[in-house]
Image (tube, rainbow, N blue to C red):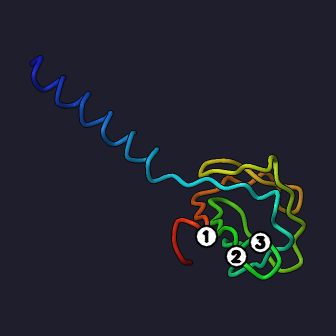
């Protein structure tokens, strides 16, 4: 019984630490514009260079949407405001972590 509990706890710690390592964050204060790639994906730009790609969990965005950041340093799981509605970020990929 103790062995199975230890294995379960170890596995849970491993899974949660993997999410922390895989999670991405970036400073969006330098972003000068954004583009709605599709109804749930936003690409932020600093001048003409991409800064981050954000996929929303529970909101839709359009090219005419009003988007406000709740803070300048954003991570997976944070929230932003789209057309007055608070929206969760499902994934955030910074340009420094790979292409999108």
Name the residue: 77% across, 74% down. 45
Q: Earlier in the sequence, mark 3 or mark 1?
A: 3
In the image: residue 16, left or right of residue 40: left
Q: Depth-wise, is mark 3 or mark 1 nearer the camera?
A: 1
Q: Mark 3 points at which residue?
A: 61
Give the crowd class for mark 3: few <14, some 14-19, many >=20 residues within 10 Å: some
Q: Quadrant of residue 29?
A: bottom right
In depth, the one of 10 and 63 nearer the eye is 10
Viewer-closest of 87 and 16: 16
- Within the image, what quadrant is residue 33 found in? bottom right
Q: Mark 1 points at which residue?
A: 95
Q: In this view, does 82 lie to the left or right of 40?
A: right
Element type where label 3 sits in the image: loop
- Whether 49 is drawn above or below 20: the answer is below
Residue 6: which quarter of the image?
Answer: top left
Whichever of callouts 1 and 2 sits on the residue coming sooner in the sequence is: 2
Tag 1 secondary structure: helix
Q: Image height check: is 94 above or below 49? A: above
Q: Dot 2 lies on which element?
A: strand
Q: Residue 57's x, y, as percent?
A: 62, 59
Q: Do the residues labelled 1 and 2 touch (CB within 8 Å)?
A: yes
Q: Mark 3 or mark 2, which is nearer the start of the sequence?
A: 2
Residue at mark 2 to residue at mark 3: CA–CA distance: 18 Å
Q: How many labels does the image show?
A: 3
Eyeballing the image, is 51 above or below 87? below
Q: Which mark, by number, is residue 50?
A: 2
Disc 3 versus disc 1: distance between alpha carbons?
21 Å
Which callout, 2 or 3, points to the residue nearer the camera?
Answer: 2
């Amino acid at each position: 019984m103790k062995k199975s509990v230890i294995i379960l706890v170890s596995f849970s710690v491993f899974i949660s630490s993997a999410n922390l390592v895989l999670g991405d964050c970036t400073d969006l204060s330098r972003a000068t514009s954004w583009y709605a790639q599709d109804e749930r994906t936003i690409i932020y730009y600093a001048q003409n260079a991409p800064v981050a790609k954000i996929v929303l969990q529970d909101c839709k965005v359009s090219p005419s949407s009003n988007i406000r950041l709740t803070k300048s340093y954003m991570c997976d799981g944070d929230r932003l405001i789209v057309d007055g509605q608070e929206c969760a970020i499902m994934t955030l990929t910074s340009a420094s972590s790979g292409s999108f």
